[in-house]
Image (tube, rainbow, N blue to C red):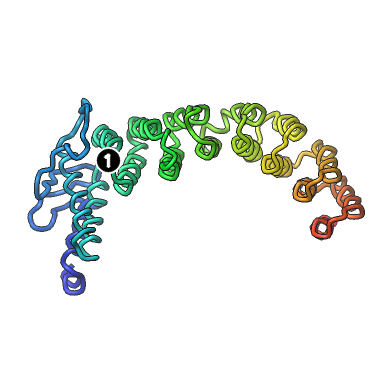
Amino acid sequence: MLLLSWVLPPGILVGILIFLAARRGGPLPDGQGTIQPGSLGELSPPRVQTPERWSLEQIPREWRPEIASSLGDYITRVEASLSSGTGSEREAAILAIDGFLASMGPEAVPTLGAILLREGSEEHRRRIVRTLGRLGGQSEEATEALQRFLLDRSGEPAASEELANVVKVMGLLQNKTSFDALLELVFNPRFPADLKSLAARSLSEHPRGGQESGLFTTLLGEAEDPALRKEAASALGRLRPLGVLVALLSALEKERDLDTTRAILASLGSIRDPLSLPPLEKKARLAAEKDIRLAAASAIASVGSLQALAILKDLAMTEAEPGVRRHLERWIEKLQ
């Protein structure tokens, strides 16, 4: 540390000390207090910040004023470093706030959830979202706080990128509450299609996804949004539940969206069931779009049987598009 003091500006050094104290526990520089790993310890911010920054209409029952005051102070430091500080001072301020949030335990969730709804800076909201995501494994209430934020911002088109980040964080939690929250999002008409499809993907990757595969069969057959049907088709190809072949072939027969059709064909290729060859051959021969013919032929090649090889050879003799024909010839060569 003595060596660092010679080569780093003082502002960065202070920030690093705070960050390390949050990770390992220990004293803060300049007698500011101590931090215990995984909790707030006895951190004493340099000055007191009241919750007026967030204009809270209601204080949660388990509100922790020391968390709110400290977080408000660290946010103020970051903002001050933007307007009048040097690059090293900003870096130190960011290290300090990140170290402070890293020190928080489940007891901070009610306070952070309330602040998240009122914080005006997207940069700091993202910090709070990351912290709640980290605490989700220790507190189901952390997932509920993220869900409340999603519902609160669902009518703001400009917030779609930020909300997508929240959905990704919820998907990583992989607890029961996150599954239920994502499921509710998929069927909530207030949310746009891209968020719904992202939530559906997170559901398929959730530990409960395999147990709830009927959800994806329903989405593939009934969802109005083609992005949702596409995600459901991909999920069925990954999960391969009982009855998946019937669901995919039924959807293939009536699907009109090209992206969803390609996803269905890819999933048929991934399950490699010989019973899929006749409808796949039909698509590979008769589809007007060359991309669909190519996707169907790729699925046939994935099945990889002698029957599949014979179909590919016949397709290569009748296919008019040179690019598709070159792919067919490569697959034939691999299977022979």
Please give the name of the residue rendered at 35% of the width and 45% of the height, measured from the top-left corner.
Answer: 130
Q: Is residue 271 visible?
A: no
Q: Which residue is mark 1?
A: 119
Q: Is residue 133 left or right of residue 235?
A: left
Task: Identify the amino acid type marked 1.
Answer: Glu
Q: Residues within 10 Å of mark 1 (few under 14, many from 20)?
A: some
Residue 320's x, y, as percent? 87, 55
Q: Is residue 294 left or right of residue 240?
A: right
Q: Is residue 242 above or below residue 289?
A: above
Q: Is residue 20 above or below residue 289?
A: below
Residue 273's x, y, as percent? 77, 39
Question: Which part of the image, by quadrant, shows the N terminus?
Answer: bottom left
Please give the name of the residue rendered at 76% of the width and 46% of the height, measured from the top-left corner.
Answer: 292
Residue 271's x, y, as percent? 71, 40
**Figure quadrant of residue 86:** bottom left
Residue 250's x, y, as percent? 75, 30
Q: Nearer the viewer, residue 316 or 153?
A: 153
Q: Is residue 309 left or right of residue 137?
A: right
Q: Is residue 111 visible?
A: yes
Disc 1 element: loop
Count of marks, rendered view = 1
